[in-house]
């Protein structure tokens, strides 16, 4: 074989057509529409943008959103880990079914999720609770849709975990809680944080599950997504866009954080 | 996999393609949120008539101003039914509705209603009058006046009632400030406000009589009370210019016939046709101090004075209270 | 054990009990009322429309997903970091922002506001919205597999004279088929369940631009609880089918 042929052989294969089509598709579907939002939100200049995005109602909506999302991920950190533990370390009849059910919030439409919670925990639910139009209702809706995230990131780590160290610690007299805290938990932390970040991102933007149960009372149960929706409806696209731009920036930041956490979590695999 | 998708698409597309050849008229009705339940009945009745046979209907209901702006922005519509004439005028300005839309004997108003207080069974807070609404501890529900036509009727009913009580305009405005202070929810539409109230929020809801009647007929644990002084709600309806105008106009005209007006009345709306109105008088008691929007200046004047998003009286009240006007 | 009881009780309270209640309420008065609710023309049209949109979106995102994965993994263009972020963005972004974006772009006064055919309040905008939100799944499933299998086989095929397309068809595609299948299932589930973005751009015209998810909301808000529950059961049944397919594909992948 000639020298040039050999050289050609070891060039990484380029796929210019694939890249071109991919970029074009992404631009049409994602990039250009989002650019329209940014353009509208920053229409009057940056000072005007902050005025509009930081008005009392928008600020209240963002604060509420962050509060609720924070609460939700804190709860998920505990319950998600507990569920993952149960699914990996425990055994009981119906475990495979439970494992499959955990993925239900991924597959179920959000509006249906909200309706199911409203049916059981709303005015005609029959269990003595009525969380409709309250922050608790919104919290429950967010718990529903974020349920799988922490479970699914922690589960594989638990499966891979080498039990030797735990057995050694047990034989030295360490209690179960100590073992978990000192040995297991540090291994879970990167995966846990990854799941928490995903859940947080999801909770910040959730709309369908929340709309029926929240009632959209400004300053009380109006989360960021409902604020944007309301302002589109009352013909205030600039107000809606301003907050939407903020939400976009937050989503991007979260994505970068999740990516970084993933790289940290798999640092030993590379 | 690809073959499956092609097959699926063909299965879904072919029947629609076949029916397109039949040239059925489909009229799209865009309305405010309250008549959602009555229009399907009107559609069925119309389709039983000779001129209505073969006409299909699609429909969309939401807050009046939201719908009006959507149609102006391109939402397809053949017939529109709004809560206030302002929302109709917007479409006259864009040329989508003829200027003479209100040229019939009923001035384009297809049904009436009144502003009522909706209360929980038992009325624990003993609310009877407008003044009771601003007593300490009373929570009032009504929608957002910058998206809902119903909210504007509610606000002007309150204002006009104060004038009826011989208060000065300034005192009446002070009352409105109090009323907004007692408001606990600002839903987009009248129907949304009703749902908020039904789920336990607030002590009293300001709503259309027709909506209150619907809630009662659905067995909800509420009743309604018509205050002595209240505003007559007149809801405009018109055909929209376009390829279906002729068929739409036929439907619009039919809605004023005694048969159609009976259906309106059976579903809680006050008929505009005197014969039908008399027949249902028992369900729709007259009120001694009933007034119309002309009493407080007419919609053109009222919209500018009260509901301009920056200079209107209501806008100023809401800004003072820290509530967004969303416009 | 406390952990077992606690975690299962949590799962039951938050997830299982509410969903079970919907099924119960939908069939509470027997099969006939359920059937009536489901066969009402608006519900049928909503189901058809939802399936139509999905039937367009899934092939598009599958094709794009494979192309994009190939571009990300094999093509050494400097902008790939941005491409990666853009692809993942729909997972972290609120659907209302998506709806707003399309509303601004294709509405009156928007950059594409003057097209000769209707986009907003019609099928095209609904397809665009659903495509946006279900974009990432095929890409994200295929990328790690492509990375893992490496380029050896493809390069070997190249030395034997195979064209890019044949290599792709004969070597790459079979290697990623389970990843693609899983991605397709996820994309389908997401498309069927889309609500927020579509609500903003479609106008919600019953019988014309109302998807099954929008039908659930409209029914509930108009005191038609039976209708809302019945449509929910339908959607839940589709969700459960998706879950089953996910399990099947996961198992199929493991066995190869």
Image (spheres, coloured by chain):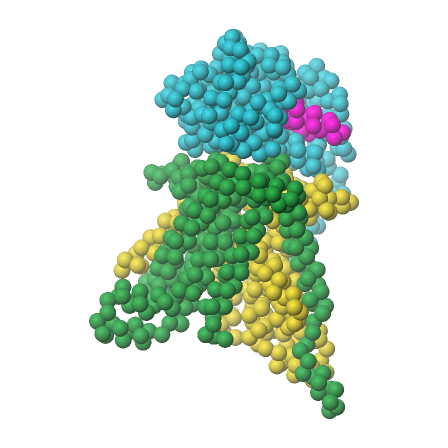
Chain colours: A green, B cyan, C yellow
Q: Quadrant of residue B68?
A: top right
Q: Residue at x 37, y 72 (%)?
A: A161
Left or right, C41 with respect to C124, comes to left
Judging depth in this view, the residue of C22 and A85 nearest the camera is A85
Judging depth in this view, the residue of C90 and A270 nearest the camera is A270
- Extent of the magenta region: B79-95
Q: Residue at x 45, y 25 (%)?
A: B182
The image shows residue C88, relative to residue B105, as above or below, that is below
Place of residue C242 in the rendered image (x, y in percent of width and height, measured from the top left): 52, 57
The image shows residue C142, relative to residue C42, as above or below, that is below
Q: Residue at x 67, y 69 (%)?
A: C77
Judging depth in this view, the residue of B232 and B267 nearest the camera is B232
Q: Quadrant of the N terminus of chain C?
A: bottom left
Whether residue C122 can be seen here: no
Place of residue A184 in the rendered image (x, y in percent of width and height, measured from the top left): 34, 68
Whether residue B301 can be seen here: yes
Left or right, C26 with respect to A34, comes to left
The image shows residue C128, relative to residue B82, as above or below, that is below
């Amino acid at each position: 074989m000639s020298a040039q042929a050999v050289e050609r052989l070891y060039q990484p294969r380029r796929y210019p057509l694939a890249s071109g089509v991919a970029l074009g598709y992404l631009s049409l579907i994602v990039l250009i529409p989002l650019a329209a939002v940014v353009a509208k939100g920053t229409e009057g200049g940056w000072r005007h943008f902050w005025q509009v995005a930081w008005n009392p109602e928008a600020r209240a909506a963002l604060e509420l959103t962050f509060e609720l999302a924070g609460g939700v991920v804190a709860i998920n950190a505990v319950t998600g880990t507990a569920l993952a533990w149960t699914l990996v370390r425990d055994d009981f009849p119906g475990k495979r079914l439970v494992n499959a059910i955990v993925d239900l919030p991924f597959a179920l439409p959000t509006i249906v999720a909200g309706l199911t919670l409203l049916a059981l925990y709303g005015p005609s639910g029959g269990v003595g609770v009525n969380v409709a139009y309250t922050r608790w209702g919104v919290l429950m809706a967010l718990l529903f849709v974020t349920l799988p995230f922490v479970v699914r990131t922690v589960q594989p780590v638990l499966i891979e975990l080498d039990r030797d160290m735990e057995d050694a610690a047990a034989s030295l007299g360490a209690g179960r809680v100590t073992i978990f805290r000192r040995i297991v938990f540090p291994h879970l932390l990167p995966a846990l944080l990854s799941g928490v970040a995903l859940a947080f991102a999801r909770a910040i933007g959730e709309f369908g599950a929340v709309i029926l149960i929240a009632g959209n009372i400004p300053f009380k149960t109006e989360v960021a997504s409902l604020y944007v929706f309301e302002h589109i409806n009352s013909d205030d696209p600039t107000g809606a866009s301003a907050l939407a731009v903020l939400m976009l920036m937050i989503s991007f930041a979260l994505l970068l954080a999740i990516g970084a956490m993933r790289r940290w979590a798999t640092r030993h695999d590379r | 996999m690809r073959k499956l998708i092609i097959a699926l698409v063909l299965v879904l597309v072919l029947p629609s393609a076949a029916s397109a050849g039949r040239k059925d008229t489909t009229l799209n009705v865009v309305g405010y949120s309250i008549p959602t339940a009555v229009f399907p009945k009107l559609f069925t009745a119309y389709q039983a008539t000779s001129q209505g046979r073969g006409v299909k209907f699609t429909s969309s209901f939401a807050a009046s101003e939201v719908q009006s702006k959507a149609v102006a922005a391109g939402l397809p519509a053949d017939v529109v039914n709004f809560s206030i004439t302002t929302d109709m005028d917007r479409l006259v300005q864009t040329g989508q509705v003829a200027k003479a839309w209100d040229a019939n004997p009923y001035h384009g108003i297809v049904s009436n209603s009144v502003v009522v207080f909706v209360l929980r069974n038992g009325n624990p807070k003993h609310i009877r009058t407008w003044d009771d609404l601003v007593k300490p501890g009373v929570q009032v529900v009504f929608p957002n006046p910058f998206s809902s036509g119903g909210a504007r009727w509610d606000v002007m009913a309150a204002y006009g009632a104060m004038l009826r009580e011989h208060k000065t305009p300034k005192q009446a405005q002070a009352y409105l400030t109090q009323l907004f202070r007692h408001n606990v929810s600002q839903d987009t539409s009248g129907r949304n406000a009703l749902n908020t109230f039904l789920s336990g929020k607030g002590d009293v809801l300001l709503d259309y009589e027709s909506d209150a009647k619907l809630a009662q007929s659905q067995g909800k644990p509420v009743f309604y009370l018509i205050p002595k002084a209240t505003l007559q709600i007149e809801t405009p309806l018109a055909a929209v210019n376009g390829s279906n105008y002729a068929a739409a106009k036929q439907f619009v005209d039919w809605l004023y016939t005694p048969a159609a007006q009976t259906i309106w009345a059976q579903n809680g709306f006050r008929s505009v046709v005197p014969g039908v109105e008399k027949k249902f008088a028992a369900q729709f008691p007259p009120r001694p101090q009933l007034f119309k929007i002309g009493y407080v200046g007419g919609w053109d004047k009222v919209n500018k004075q009260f509901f301009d998003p920056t200079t209107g009286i209501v806008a100023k009240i809401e800004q003072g209270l820290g509530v967004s006007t969303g416009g | 054990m406390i952990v077992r009881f606690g975690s299962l009780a949590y799962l039951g309270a938050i997830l299982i009990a509410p969903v079970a209640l919907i099924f119960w309420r939908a069939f509470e008065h027997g099969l006939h009322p359920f059937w009536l609710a489901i066969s009402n023309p608006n519900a049928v049209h909503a189901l058809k429309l939802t399936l139509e949109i999905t039937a367009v979106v899934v092939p598009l995102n599958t094709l794009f997903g494979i192309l994009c994965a190939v571009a990300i993994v094999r093509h050494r263009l400097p902008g790939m970091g941005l491409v990666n972020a853009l692809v993942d963005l729909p997972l972290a972004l609120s659907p209302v922002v998506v709806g707003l974006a399309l509303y601004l772009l294709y509405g009156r006064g928007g950059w594409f506001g003057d097209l000769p055919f209707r986009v907003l309040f019609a099928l095209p905008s609904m397809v665009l919205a659903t495509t946006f939100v279900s974009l990432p799944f095929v890409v994200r499933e295929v990328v790690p597999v492509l990375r893992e299998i490496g380029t050896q086989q493809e390069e070997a095929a190249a030395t034997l004279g195979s064209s890019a397309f044949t290599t792709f068809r004969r070597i790459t595609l079979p290697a990623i088929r389970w990843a693609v299948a899983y991605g397709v299932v996820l994309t389908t589930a997401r498309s069927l369940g889309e609500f927020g973005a579509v609500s903003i751009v479609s106008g919600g015209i019953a019988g014309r631009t109302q998807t099954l998810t929008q039908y659930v909301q409209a029914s509930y808000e108009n005191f038609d609880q039976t209708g809302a529950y019945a449509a929910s059961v339908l959607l839940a049944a589709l969700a459960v089918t998706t879950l089953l397919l996910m399990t099947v594909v996961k198992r199929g992948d493991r066995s190869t």
